[in-house]
Amino acid sequence: MNIEQAARRVDDAARYASAIEQMGTSEAFQVEDAYRIQRASIALREARGERTIGIKLGFTSRAKMIQMGVDSLIWGWLTDAMLEEEGAPVDLARFIHPRVEPEVCFLTKRDIDRPLTALEALGHLEAVAPAMEIIDSRYQAFRFTLEDVIADNCSSAGLVVGAWSNRFDVLRNAGVLMRFDGRDVQVGSTAAILGDPLRSIVQASRVTSEAEVVLPAGSLIMAGAATAAQALRRGLHVQCVVSGIGQAEFTTQHEGGHVNETTRND
C-alpha cells in the first residue's frame, strides 16, 4: 500500500466530509502500516497549519476489545482544529455521520517521554475534566476494520472539554450521564475506562513510547469512552456529567450544511 496516497485519501475524506470505501477491501494492510498512514495524514493537517495538542485512546473497554477481536487499545492524534469551544454551537456540516461519547480528559504537567508506572502517572498530571469526543468514521456506513479505523485517526473528529478539576480521587468509579435536550441517552461509569481512567495515562505512555513520540507538558489525553456513542443530529443540547468533577456541554446548529442522514444511525 502506498502510505502517502492512503493518507491523502483519508485526509480528503475528513477535510471535505465525503465518505470513502474501506481501504482494506481493495488492499490488505497491517496495523503498522495503518499507524504510518495515520501519522502521514496528521502531517498533512500540520502542513495546513494545524497543531497537535495531544492524543486520544480507543478500545479502552474490555467489551470493545472483544467486539473488535483485539487485545490492546488503539490511539490517535488531537489537533487544535478539532477542539470545540465548550458550551458553543458545533457545526455538523463538517462531519459525515457524527456521534458523541462521554469521556474524561487529562491535562499533563510534565513531558511523557517513557513508559510510566501506575505510581508515576498521577505525578505527570495537572488536571482532569469532563469531556466529550465527537467521532466520525470517514468510511461509508460507519463500518471498518481495525486497520481502517487506525488509519482514519481512530475516527476522532472533535472534542469538547469542560472545566478543569484536581479531583483525581473520585475517578475510579464515577457516574457518567450523557443527555440530549435534558434527557438521559447514555448512563455509565468511568470504571468502563480500563477499570480506572488513570490507567489510561499508563497506556498512553506505553503507546507513545513505542512510537518514539514524546508528549509534551500541556498535552491533552482523552481517556476513552465511558459509554457507547450516540448519533448526533441538528438542534440538540448535549451535556455530559461526570460525578465529582463537573460537566461539559455543547449545542448543534439548527441549520446549515449536510449530515449524512442515511448512515448517521447505522
Image (cartoon, rainbow, N blue to C red):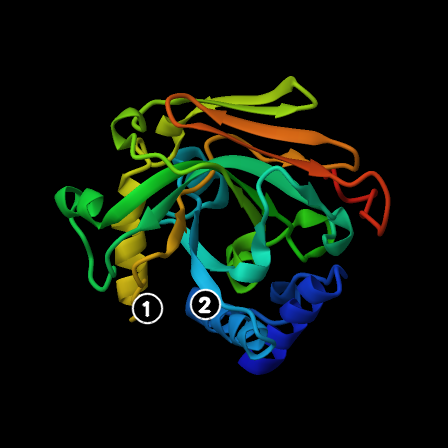
Q: Position of residue 249 (x, y in %)?
A: 59, 33
Q: Residues under labels 2 and 1: Cα distance?
A: 9 Å
One can see residue 145 in this view: no
Neighbour class for label 1 at 10 Å: few (<14), some, many (≥20)?
few
Q: Which residue is mark 2?
A: 35
Q: Amino acid at mark 1?
A: Ala
Q: Please name the residue shown 32% across and 53% down the image.
A: 204
Tell me: 236 left or right of 124: right
Which of the numbered marks, if any, corresponds to residue 211?
1
The quadrant where residue 208 appears: bottom left
**Mark nearer the N terminus (2 vs 1):** 2
One can see residue 49 in this view: yes
> Contact, CB < 8 Å: mark 2 with mark 1?
yes
Q: Position of residue 73 (x, y in %)?
A: 38, 49
Q: Position of residue 71 (x, y in %)?
A: 35, 47
Tell me: 263 left or right of 102: right
| Secondary-structure class at tag 1 | loop
Tell me: 190 left or right of 201: right
Q: Please name the residue shown 20% across and 62% down the image.
A: 114
The quadrant where residue 24 appears: bottom right
Q: Residue furthest top?
A: 183
